Amino acid sequence: MRRLTTYIVLFRGVGGATSLPVQPLKQALIEDGFERVATYINTGNVVLVSDLAPEEIQQRIAAIALEKFAFSKSIMVLDNDEWKKLIAGNAFPDHVAEGDKLHAFVLEKEPDADAVKALERKAEGLPEQFTIVGKVLYYYPPQGASQSKLHGKIESTLKVTTTARNWNTVLKLGQLADRLQGG
């Protein structure tokens, strides 16, 4: 019997000048055999069900995105249990009502201690707050990410590929994953 798992797939760098047409993407993933495929807003968020391992999903989706849409940026894949832990692990629970300001950065790997210290130094004296838990960086800039002095320096300072979602999107993807998992 196949063991189906619900996954959240995050495309890095979608938005602005980089588009990834969600309806054609959804159709391409269904045609490739992924089940219960859903997309959420036009910034590179897919929820799907598969019996493949996360690495296989990432490789297959990367190949589809490159071949059909000329998209070649990083893709992160988390299963629904990992997503639930990401939500439960929120380091800034007092700011969930500010879901457009609170962010979760999914990291390709855990950053090394020196890189974390370098980011801490860059944050000194700034109103922004961040905490890293495993491969997730929780980030709260009270003035908003667009006005932040730290936001654009996170990935380059940590020397780790990241993709960020605001908390509203994090919660919506979790709800969507729960619905698909039950489905």
Image: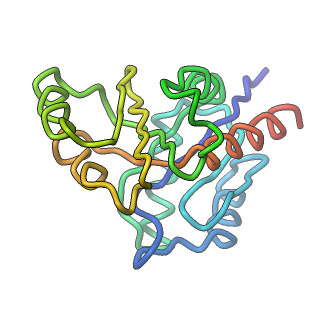
Residue at the farthest right position: 183
Quadrant showing the N terminus: top right
* Number of marks drawn: 0
| Residue 16: % across, % down | 44, 75
Give the quadrant of the C terminus: top right
Residue 89 drawn at (x, y percent) = 54, 20
x then y, percent, for residue 180 = 81, 40
Residue 94 vs 61, above or below: the answer is above
Specify the color scheme: rainbow
Q: Which residue is drawn at 65% across and 41% down?
A: 97
27 sits left or right of 18 in the view: right
Pick the front one: 87 or 141: 141
Q: Is residue 95 left or right of residue 111?
A: right
Residue 34, how many percent across, how many down?
A: 69, 48
Q: Which residue is drawn at 68% across and 40% down?
A: 171
- Residue 112, placed above or below residue 180: above
In depth, the one of 40 and 150 nearer the eye is 150
Return the residue nearer the eye: 61 or 39.
Answer: 39
Give the quarter of the image for residue 108.
top left
The residue at the point 61 percent across, 41 percent down is 8
Q: Check the image and name the residue furthest to the bottom.
A: 17
- Work out whether 33 lies above or below 180: below
Q: Residue at the spot x=72%, y=39% of the render?
A: 49
Left or right of 28: which side holds 115?
left
In which image quadrant can residue 38 be found?
A: bottom right
Would you place residue 78 above or below residue 76 in this image?
above
* Left or right of 6, for residue 42: left
- Indicate the quadrant where residue 24 lies: bottom right
